[in-house]
Amino acid sequence: MPPSSSVSTDPDPRLPDVARRFLRYVRIDTQSDPSSQSVPTTPKQMDLSRLLVSELRDLGVADVEMDDHGIVFATLEATAAAPDGTALPVVALLAHVDTAPDAPGTGVEPLVHFAWDGLPITLPGDPSVVLDPAVRPALKHHVGEDVITSDGRTLLGSDDKAGVAVLVQLAADLVSDPSPRPRVRLCFTVDEEVGRGTDHLDLDRLGADVAYTVDGSDIDTISYETFHAASARVSIEGVGVHPGYAKGVMVNALRIASRLVASLPEAESPEHTEGGEGFIHPHTQSASDVHHAEVQLILRDFTAEGLERRKSVVRTIVEGLRLSYPGSRITLEMQDQYRNMRSYIERLDPRTVSFAYDAARRMGITLRAEAVRGGTDGARLSEKGLPTPNLFNGGMDYHSCFEWNTVQNLERTLDYVKHLLRTWAERGNEPSSLHDFGT
Ligand SMILES: [Zn+2]
């Protein structure tokens, strides 16, 4: 039985609209599937897409449509223009309907732990799932709030139904509100969790000048940094002969591959780094025997110079192996994969970040930049020419049965997005060349 302070049913009169909306959406199974080649990868994602279309139409929102891929678009018309009468930049706000394949996503039963007392929360569907603030310190900032979890058997789906609920509630609140805002394009994408969220997103159809994904974590975070990334492949040809008569002749490719991996700086590996630290990661050693071996690596760094330094570390190690094993033939291929999204955003429109900080200040929040240690939709959109930082949505411990958010965080996120639109309405005519990241 759930503890008496929990409810698992809604609508509950104590809950604001954005939270009720969130509790409805998380019950809809929208898990994406990396092994599927269909678009979207699971047709059930469109269950939520279709519901959003009908709810947005019922609200009277303009231009509501779903494309063939399950992506939903809608418009909140501008209620403000620049002082000289010209149009303000069009701001797109994006959230993804799918949930992660990393934890069970079917049969989500959300629980609201009203006025959480700060003690560990044991989830009734699986008592081994305990949200303990001693282990998850971010929880400590939310004592007294109404914490939302799953019942422990599934993920919650706050990633990114918190973003979805906030954006639909934004539409509900603003559709007939005359307070100043630029033209807003709402967009609900599919398959973000399997890295295909922007593959079929038609940027002309989106028609925005700047964008934000509402898909981040706890209140006060913004993400506009991802890695600079490169990959490397080292192929080693050895010389194989009968081991009984190998002295001075055999060159063992497997041994050279092992030396290569052992020579990489272990402190600069994924398992020893976090935050803004980069790494060199040997991830595959394949087809290895005396004759031939191959090692594949990825290199990551938040600065372009740092990535170049890591590349030269690999080159130097390979050069050393060539000298140590003159009978071998070692080839190194290195390729750039993608660049830190910051470099695109800085060039395209730094106001996206500067106004995000300004909007937070207006709410009394100090934003904290959180570097993303992986790919994001915003990174891909920024690379395609649409500057797209990622905003918080209040949730934490994503992709697991421990996932949580709070009613108050959903309200704060909604409030924050409104402040952000107000900032764009008031300052959207300022030339982007005058802005830096304004931190
Ligand atoms: Zn997400």
Image (tube, rainbow, N blue to C red):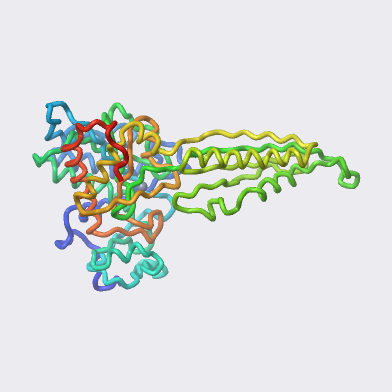
Task: Kindly tell me whether residue 27 is visible in this rendering.
Answer: no
Q: Could you tell me how many numbered marks the image carries?
A: 0
Indicate the quadrant where residue 253 lies: top right
As drawn, the residue found furthest toward the front would be: 434
Give x and y (percent) for residue 85.
12, 27
Give x and y (percent) for residue 125.
36, 66
Indicate the quadrant where residue 317 lies: top right
Task: Tell me what residue is drawn at x 18 percent, y 33 percent.
Answer: 183
- Judge whether 222 appears above or below 110 on screen: above
Q: Looking at the image, which is closer to me, 225 or 174?
A: 225
- Judge whether 427 appears above or below 204 on screen: below
Q: Looking at the image, which is closer to me, 258 or 73?
A: 258
- Judge whether 65 appears above or below 254 on screen: above
Task: Tell me what residue is drawn at x 26 percent, y 36 percent.
Answer: 92
Asked if residue 271 lies left or right of residue 193, the reply is: right
Q: Looking at the image, which is closer to me, 89 or 291?
A: 89
Give x and y (percent) for residue 410.
24, 54
Task: Kindly tell me whether residue 350 is visible in this rendering.
Answer: yes
Give x and y (percent) for residue 19.
21, 55
Quadrant, the N terminus: bottom left
Q: Looking at the image, which is closer to me, 410 or 191?
A: 410
Asked if residue 303 lies left or right of residue 412, the reply is: right
